Image (cartoon, rainbow, N blue to C red):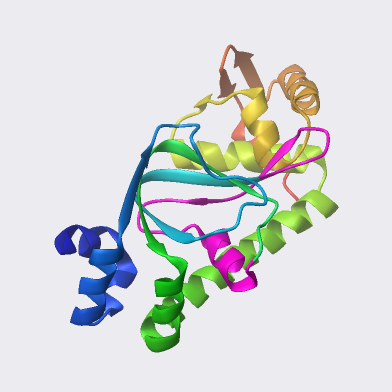
Amino acid sequence: MEKIFEQRLPFFKTLSPEEKRTFIQKSQFLEGEAGKVIIEAGALCRMVYFVLEGRLRVYKLSEDGREITLYRAAKGEACLFTLTCIMGEEGLDTITVVEDKAKLVGIPSEYFESLMGNNLEFQRYFLRRLLMKISNLVMLTEEITFFSIESRLAKYLLNLYEQEKTTTLSVTHEKIAFEIGTAREVVSRMLKVFQKQKILNMSRGKITLLSIKKLEKFLPL
């Protein structure tokens, strides 16, 4: 088990031999298929979860039922909102769900706090990760507040193009709406506008980009 943790959890090497043994002893494992809810909105956090395989998505649900994705946690990362929940000792109004079939390991919040207090390298690692996520959330807030739907949609499609290395993107209108923080109907309307401008073509569950240069023109300066 120690070898698996060393391979998949970057912070594990910061632990002393005794801390590693205790970490393994206190570990609890959890597996979930896509769609499994790990933490409900408002739930108190008693465990800090780390991703061994797969990916988690953390999102917020609006009063009218719309979702906005706040961040993701992939292999080797912690679900950082559980950290803020533990530190504040109150539940957050966010939902953590398995996006890709995942294997997780959790440790009790009391032991996590002990590690944070007694291991400076461990503390620095998680503070850096937390600051990175906060920075990303600030950028997300700026995009939603100041950028147009066209800009946010163009940026999302271009990012997906760069990730998948193909102009044929397997993504639904609903998922795009979750990612850029708007309604599905708004996404569908804007995609139709882009299609009329010959920027892309739409088919069931797929979007084919026809002109990267035209799409880039919608990005904020």
Q: Say which residue appears at 73% left-offset and 24% top-offset.
A: 191
Please tell me which residue is depicted at 41% across the width and 65% down the height of the picture: 108
Place of residue 218 in the rendered image (x, y in percent of width and height, measured from the top left): 75, 41
Q: Residue at x 70, y 55 (%)?
A: 140
> Is 78 part of what is drawn in magenta?
yes
Q: Residue 189's spot in the image, x, y percent?
A: 80, 22
- Residue 76 vs 97, above or below: the answer is below
Query: Is there any visible trace of residue 218 in the rendered image?
Result: no
Q: Is residue 205 magenta?
A: no
Residue shown at the point (76%, 17%) measured from the top left: 196
Query: Outermost residue, top direction?
Result: 204
Q: Where is residue 153, by image quadrant? A: top right
Quadrant holding the C terminus: bottom right
Taking the image as shown, residue 143 lies to the left or right of residue 90, namely right
x and y percentages locating residue 71 in the rendered image: 58, 52
Q: Does residue 97 sit above or below 79 in this rendering? A: above
Left or right of 158 in this view: 106: left
In the rendering, at what x and y percent does residue 213 appear?
Answer: 64, 37
The span picked out in magenta is 60-89
Please indicate whether residue 210 sits to the left or right of residue 182 in the image: left
Quarter holding the N terminus is bottom left
